[in-house]
Image (tube, rainbow, N blue to C red):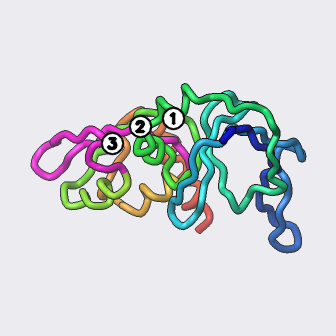
């Protein structure tokens, strides 16, 4: 079997007199070397090496349109082979992208379950922090979706470092509070 790149248009949603979809990148083709399909939170994703960005990225299958084979040989095999799927999924919380950052959270001991559900046992470094707390050191993609997940923990978890992430999260919460 010969593996080759594919090309497709990628859709995004917007609101204008109702919910509509349009093509991203001003209707440019995405050219990707496909490597893996996976399901995450009910959506199917293609993991592949993106020609334009020269790195491994993911795409939701239901947002791909006009998919075609290109007859061009795949690229990025070395990058894909270095990839740990467990780490990739952990870093791309809910499959949303953002700046990849090493983040430390201080969490109440009784809130361990959602932390392990999100980051796993081996995908993060855990350490004791007094009698009632622990710290988790994890690499994530900083995004509003990550902030939304963290907000669900309420006062049971706090971003300790880096400072810019804690400040960005605080600003995000303040913007939401101003709506009310």
Left or right: residue 163 compared with residue 94: left
Looking at the picture, how far across and down is residue 17, in whole percent?
Answer: 88, 73
In the rendered structure, which segment of residues is drawn in magenta? 119-144
What kind of element bears circle 1?
Answer: strand
Q: Which residue is mark 1?
A: 100
Mark 3 or 2: in front is: 3
Q: Answer whether labels 3 and 2 touch (C-beta < 8 Å).
A: no
What kind of element bears circle 3?
Answer: loop
Image disc number at residue 123: 3
| Residue at (54, 67) in percent of width and height | 42
Q: Answer whether labels 1 and 2 touch (C-beta < 8 Å).
A: yes
Mark 3 or 1: in front is: 3
* Furthest residue in direction left, as rendered: 131
Q: Residues within 10 Å of mark 3 (few under 14, many from 20)?
A: some
Q: Is residue 144 visible?
A: no
| Residue at (81, 57) in percent of width and height | 65
What kind of element bears circle 2?
Answer: strand
Distance from disc 3 to disc 1, alpha carbons, whole Å, reads: 15 Å
Q: Is residue 15 above or below residue 76?
A: below
Image disc number at residue 139: 2
Distance from disc 3 to disc 2, alpha carbons, whole Å, reads: 9 Å
Distance from disc 1 to disc 2, alpha carbons, whole Å, reads: 7 Å
């Amino acid at each position: 079997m010969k593996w080759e790149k594919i090309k497709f248009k990628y859709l995004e949603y917007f609101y204008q007199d109702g919910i509509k979809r349009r093509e991203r990148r001003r209707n440019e083709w995405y050219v990707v070397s496909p490597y893996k399909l996976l399901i995450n939170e009910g959506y199917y994703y293609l993991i592949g090496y993106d020609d334009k960005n020269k790195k491994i990225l993911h795409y939701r299958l239901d947002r791909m349109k006009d998919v075609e084979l290109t007859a061009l040989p795949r690229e990025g095999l070395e990058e894909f082979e270095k990839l740990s799927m467990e780490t990739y999924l952990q870093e791309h919380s809910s499959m949303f992208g953002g700046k990849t950052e090493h983040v430390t959270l201080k969490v109440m001991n009784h809130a361990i379950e959602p932390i392990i559900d999100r980051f796993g046992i081996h995908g993060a470094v855990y350490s004791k922090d007094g009698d009632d707390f622990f710290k988790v050191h994890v690499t994530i993609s900083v995004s509003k979706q990550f902030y939304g997940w963290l907000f669900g923990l309420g006062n049971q978890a706090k971003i300790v470092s880096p400072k810019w992430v804690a400040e960005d999260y605080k600003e995000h919460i303040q913007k939401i509070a101003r709506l009310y």
